[in-house]
Image (cartoon, coloured by chain):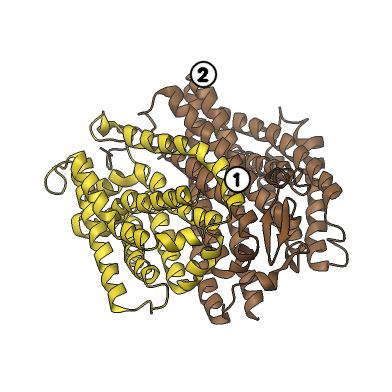
Chain colours: A yellow, B brown
Amino acid sequence: MELIWFAFFAVLLAGYFALEGFDLGVGLLLPVLGRTAGDRDRMVAGIAPFVLAGEVWLVAVAGTLFGAYPMLEGEVLFGLYPLVVAMLLSWIVRDAGLWFRRRIGGARWRGFWDLMITLGSLGLSFGWGVALHAAATGFGSSLLHPLGLLLGLVVTLLFAFHGWIFLGWRLPGFAGAARSGRALLLSAALAALPAIGVLAGGMGYLLDHSAPPATLNVLSLMVLPFAPIMLGAQLWVWRTFRPGKDADRIPSFF
Amino acid sequence: MDVLELARLQFAVTGSLHFLFVVLTLGLAPLVAIMHTRWARSGRPLDERMTRFWGQIYVINYAMGIVTGLVMEFQFGLSWSGLSHYAGDVFGAPLAMETLVAFFLESTFLGLWIFGWGRLPKYAHLACIWLVAATAYASAFYIMVANSFLQNPAGAVVAGDRLELADFGALLTNKTLVFSFPHVLGAGLFTGAMVLVGASAYQLRRRTGEVEFFTRSMRMGVVTAAIGIFLTVGFGYAQFGGIQEGKFDGDVAAAVPLAIMMEGGNLLSLFVLLFMLPLVAVLHRWRRTQLVLIALTPLPFVLAILGWLARELGRQPWMIWERLTVADAMTPGLTSGMVTASLVGFVLVLGLLAVVDYVLIARVIRRGPRDLDLGATAEQRSPALTY
């Protein structure tokens, strides 16, 4: 049972990196590839249908942390206190940027929220690198440890690369070559690699700190029947918004 | 203020902000789903415009519900890790259900509903908004299960220095849950309905020409408000049957909001059931009354927050009633500096965003059902196509 919940947790965290990584990456690339307001609109519209279905993976990670690893939840989050607060604020302004940018017409309004999307994406991407380093070292080292900062840079670059490949898949010809679904899958795996590495290293520790069997049994009984529905809903999103299918008729809300 | 008070203040402020948006989400979700159902069945442009207009207000409001909710979820680990250490094996289960299943599905289906406009088959698109409403209710249910466990730790036994889950069924049939959950749903419906009424009154009073649109919206709002307030007040009083012994005795901080909420709820229910409901057929013409209806719009929000203050302040000094105090639940090592810095950050950012969000909602209401972003087709708005 502990193993099932570890697998569940690992899939959620790796899934977050793979599925939200490109959203953050496109946010990072907004000032780089989106020279004109129209370009930025197209980039945001490209990720728009995937954002809501992507960020929920992290909400689920935190929920699993609480449910399946209650003894670790406080340790992890409190151990990273300033980082978690900074990442939450980044997440908030990134989301606000997406929801608000098109609600009022002016160029300055939209420019401001586009900047918020980029800064928020940067805070989250970089923060993940630092957080993974801290987790790998047992939350003992400083959050400003050079290796952690380096990993922050690596994750940021990986997400930007993943976002770039995503744009090639979803908006062929917009930024470089058109990319196949296989290329996107590959860049997703690459983006998830740092998370998978830390999960593999921390597997024993996580298994030892699982909630007692009674709790895990209840959680399994409650959650696992919904797993196919959750997976189905995600697949539905990807099927519905794949490139091609009378795509140019659909404007973006974001 | 010492660190404990600061941490409590942080939870109270962010929690109240969160519920301001959640209460409207809970009320509007089923109403928008009903409008969408009418549109799917009749195909009438009026039904489509109602779905898009109220749907746009719903989703702008939902955005703030998400971002304030994120802060709530992570705050448990930041400030209150004593709770997960002591009772995580019990409290974690409903919280995991909410975040892992209910919210996960709600957000996924909402994305499909918003961006699937014109792309999904008609009834698949309709199914999305009903799934959004159903999962929103499921979310509310599991949060209330978790909260009710704090009020009355049913289904758990003390094992050593921790609580252990003994009976999950008892968690779901908690006496502090069975009436508070429908009470919250009723309050949501009432709040959403009063927004329909207030916004429609504003548009009708200004004679914007959308008479049929807002007459229908107002009628739907009045009828729903009557159902909502009936449920809220009924299940509100019913809760006293299952309340913890002595919860409000000599506790001024909790008794005052409780008294104001009950008095306000009673007066509002009289106004809705004895005035608005019988006069539903003529309200759209009574311009002076419309001023009153507009002025009433914020009241359900205020009462909802007062209700939470009463429930949560009444629980003090317990985090888990007669098991764990709030002071013991606080993360060891938390300092005033840490909480102050994060409190300022969260309150500043979320407060500003909340103001912006309400301005944007007010703007949609003022402009009425034209140039809506939600469900716009490419011809209506040329740039920013998705591919």
Task: Please state which of residues B156 and B2 is positioned toward the viewer in this rendering.
Answer: B156
Residue B322: where, in percent of width, then height?
Answer: 78, 64
A78 sits to left or right of B237: left
Question: Could one spot residue A147 in this view of the protein?
Answer: yes
Q: How many marks?
A: 2
Q: Amino acid at mark 2?
A: Arg
Q: Quadrant of residue B69?
A: bottom right
- Vertical relation: A230 (above or below) A56: above
| Residue matched to label 1 | A218
- Vertical relation: B7 (above or below) A193: below
| Residue matched to label 2 | B41
Element class at badge 2: helix
- Would you say the residues marked 2 and 1 are in contact, meaning their CB atoms lie under 8 Å apart? no
At x 24%, y 35%, the residue is A243
Question: Could one spot residue A37 in this view of the protein?
Answer: no
Q: Residue furthest left?
A: A177
At x 86%, y 47%, the residue is B241
A147 sits to left or right of B104: left
Element class at badge 1: helix
At x 35%, y 64%, the residue is A128
Residue A55: where, in percent of width, then height?
Answer: 41, 51
Q: Amino acid at mark 1?
A: Val
Chain ID, mark 1: A
